[in-house]
Image (cartoon, grey):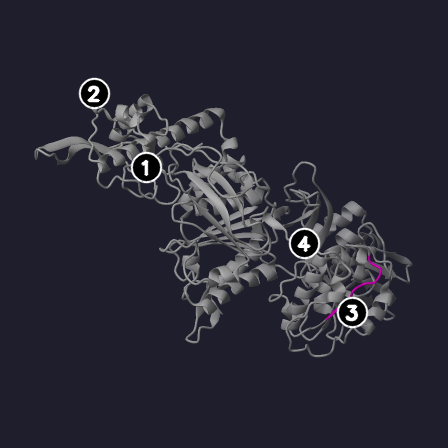
Amino acid sequence: MSAAPRMDTPDATSFGPLIGAVARRVWGEPNKRLSKPGEMRWGNQGARIVYSKTGAFKDTEADQSGGTLELLRHTCGLDKGGAVAWLVREGLIPDRAREHAIKLHPGQRIVATFLFTDAGGRLLYRKHRIEPGRGDRRKEFAYDRPDSAGGWRWGRGDDQVPYRLADLANAPKDAAIYMAEGEAKADRLASWGLIATSSKDWRAFDFSGYVKGRSVIILPDNDNTGTQLAEKVKADVERAEGRPVIVHLPRLPDKGDVLNWDGDAAELAALVETAPSATAAPADTFPVADLAAWAKVEPTPKRFVMTGVIPEGEVTLFTGPGGTNKSTFGLQLCACAATGVPMLRVAVDAVPALYVTAEDEDRENHWRLRKIANAIGTTLEGLAGRLNVVSIRGRLNNELATFDAEGRLHPAPAFQLLRATIEKTEAKLIVLDNVGHLYVGNENDRGQVTAFINLLYQLCRELGVTIVLIAHPNKAGDSYSGSTAWLNAVRSQIVLQRPEDGLDPDARVLTLGKANYARPDQQLAFRWHDFALVVDADLSEDQRAEVASIARDANDNAVFLKCLAERTRQQRAVSEKTGRNLAPVVFATMPEAKGVGKERLERAMDRLFRLGKIERAELWKGADRKPVYGLRERAGNAAGNGAETRCGNAGNPSAETRATHTPLLRKGTGAAFQGSAPVPEGNDSPTHSSVHRTVPGMILAPGETGFEPLPHDPFEGTD
């Protein structure tokens, strides 16, 4: 194809896409007979020319040329300020009362801006390249769009279009489309007179009509990511009935692209001519990796959204017993990703996040997220625009797929809603809570389970997202419920549970159940504290001291009960009354006491009485048939599953549960480095108050402690 002349004018980059619309307003409709794709002509001889691909014009009779602003100066006598005001009045650009709607963090700046217009050249939204990106990223991108007041608002809105849509929409059907990995690269191709767009934000289904029946030349960057993206775009074009051809540019440096290629339009045309035919029907085979292309780039290790825990671009199965705060973990992970702060001192990628829950309503999410924001050092305002929370609790038909009589999967409307939500929010980390609401197939059917996981992997592949799928274990104690296909279908599984000793109801341990991309012998220990998850090192000195005290008390309570059980087994009664059978005195001499002395055992006995764990009662009949009285553990109050409870008027009030936990990922198994906190200890006045108390035997909902405000004022006492 012949290349149009490039006009390097100061305004070609910012106003170039508008030049066709401006020319029509000042010159009328072009001469259709003399015009051709990318080159509109006016006048009987076609002396006035607009090159829509480069955003430039040329008037050969008047010997004038330039960009959009120069066109207005030439035709209307307007200086730069007047030309911009004219564009505002004509509705072609918004009033730039504000330069943009992008929130820049300290040290960041916008280095490039790309305009997305409709087929007629009207501006829909802008894409800004920001350097440096947050976290360890070299760059990041953000969007804004015109608002109704002549300014800008954040995001793309609902009208998402391909880059350089006007060129695509107006190009002849036999013209090839060139796809490069980014807008700046597409602009360079357009400067050579080619129909070009970007593959970076290409939406396979929505944009399929633009490539149907066309030859599409795909130019990958010279790295592994570029190769993978090119293969994905090729598959998308084939599904849209287009004819894709991947052309690898020669002599590119490592990670190079068309912007730093030393070739030109003529050489590119020759490369396309010698590439595999773009007119041949796609072969009916599985996609085969191009090892020759692989040989040109260095492979890259697997990236992680949460270092060593959650691999990027994968579906991670997240399981654990009820009440271990899986929902809190998922929401906090999203909040950390949205702000780019570590999760429990483990590095997390700074990416937009989406948390979808069928378990909790917005009131609970609001409460929990405010606590999480406080714990990680941010605010709800700081999370806005980067974290999106969706509650589908109480909504019917939340299943993502259904299965017919032959067991074939069919995506359900909820799946399309999920996909659209991901695209609109531009989220890259997705947490789905939980599988019980989203999967309605037979959890023991290997084929159905695998098909469902592959449906989620479709989102990972096509939208470039990472998914964490929360699930519950089965009653047999396995770390998942249903067929082993759940584990076989994913590449990563994490398990959240309480430490084995069970003394501290707030302690948690995260382990890697399946880790194809990390060491499986790692664990992360932490605790639930004030509706968020924290490590001990992040607590204040006073809190850590209190934790240590509570952990010691919990141990003493357990020691007392163990000694009491042994004496009961031996039918040797002990008493709470002063004398030779005083329980703390007797227990202090037993090996089961493990060195705990009389005074600590006395305090443990007092706590256990207050908690209703022990009582004085008839134990058995003596040899003389007279009843023997002494201490015993109360029936129904033996150690259970460690679940917490809450009650507004507890007969046996208990003090607030505190926190201990272990920082850092470390090799090996076992519990936290520090001790565990006790079962809640009572106080002396069982009065009804605004602070709720726990009662033995009652079961809490996940994440509850028994200390939440009353339901009539859900945000009472918050910061």
In this picture, which residue range is highlighted in magenta? 245-252
The amino acid type, in three-letter code, at marker 2 is Thr
Q: Which mark is residue 578?
A: 2
Q: CA distance from mark 1 to mark 4?
A: 54 Å
Q: Eyeballing the image, is 331 above or below 576?
A: below
Q: Is residue 247 magenta?
A: yes
> Which numbered mark, 4 or 2, is in the foreground of this view?
2
Question: Mark 3 highlights which residue?
Answer: 37
The residue sitting at 31% across, 25% down in the picture is 588
Disc assigned to residue 353 = none
Mark 4 crowd level (few <14, some 14–19, many ≥20, 10 Å Cα): few
Q: Amino acid at mark 3?
A: Pro
Q: Mark 2 or 3 closer to N-term?
A: 3
Question: What percent of the width, then of the height, locates residue 602?
Answer: 29, 24
Q: CA distance from mark 4 to mark 2?
A: 93 Å
Residue 118 x/y as whole percent: 67, 61
Residue under label 1: 710
Q: Quick one: which residue is furthest to the left in this view?
A: 625
Give the residue pinned by disc 4.
91
Q: Nearer the viewer, residue 156 or 177?
A: 177
**Which numbered mark, 1 or 4, is in the foreground of this view?**
1
Q: Amino acid at mark 1?
A: Leu
Give the image location of residue 58, x and y in percent: 86, 60
Quadrant of the rendered structure where residue 115 is?
bottom right
Does label 4 or label 2 sit earlier along the sequence? 4
Q: For the residue labelled by badge 2, is the local secondary structure a helix, a strand or a loop?
A: loop
Q: Amino acid at mark 4?
A: Gly
Label 1 close to label 2 by CB (< 8 Å): no
